[in-house]
Amino acid sequence: MKLITGIVNGKPEDLTQFYENCKFFEGKKVDIEIRLHKKKRSDLQNSYYWGVVLPKVRNHLSKKLNQELSIDDVHYIVKKYFIGSRKVNLTDRVEEIPISTTTLSTLEFVEFTDRIKTHFAEDGLIIPDPDQKDFLDNEEKNS
């Protein structure tokens, strides 16, 4: 069960659905977790990132570095560079692991892709905006 509600004067705004769903767990122990709600990125944002941004960056970097990179390689690189990383203490060393894009809200994900586009525009790569259909159509014809 997941409930999204606001807090007013230190209390949830609407617990009607919560109490209704609790009936299904009658007599059982349950875990209840409260955390700040973040709107996750949309399927359209995800499609744009994996279908436009990453392939464009992959092609650009592969040519520039004269070595073939996979989409996953580029995803790892841009996460680490544009979101950051966290340190994990292993037994024999400290490892830096990029922060996952799945932790980003809708707005944070837009800011993330904007940083990628700005950075690579300075290097001569123009990544179209998600709503630039004319540009995308011309790119497909020229590919």
Image (tube, rainbow, N blue to C red):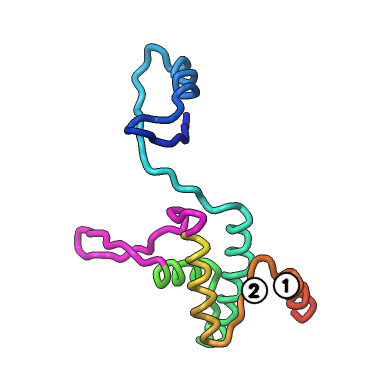
In-image side of 114 versus 29 (left or right): right
Who is closer to the viewer here, 34 or 141?
A: 34
User: Which residue appears at 38% of the width and 34% of the height?
Assistant: 8
Q: Is residue 34 above or below residue 25?
A: below
- The image quadrant of residue 82 is bottom left
- The image quadrant of residue 133 is bottom right
Q: Secondary structure at mark 2?
A: loop
User: Badge 2: few (under 14), some or many (20 or more) residues near its Cα, within 10 Å?
Assistant: some
User: Which residue appears at 57% of the width and 82% of the height?
Assistant: 60
Q: Which residues are magenta?
A: 83-107
Q: Is residue 132 a member of the stretch shown in magenta?
A: no
Q: Is residue 72 above or below residue 135?
A: above
Q: Which dot marks residue 128?
A: 2
Q: Position of residue 89 (x, y in %)?
A: 22, 59
Q: Which dot marks residue 136?
A: 1
In-image side of 138 versus 6 (left or right): right
Q: Quadrant of the C terminus?
A: bottom right
Outermost top residue: 27
User: Which residue appears at 45% of the width and 34% of the height?
Assistant: 5
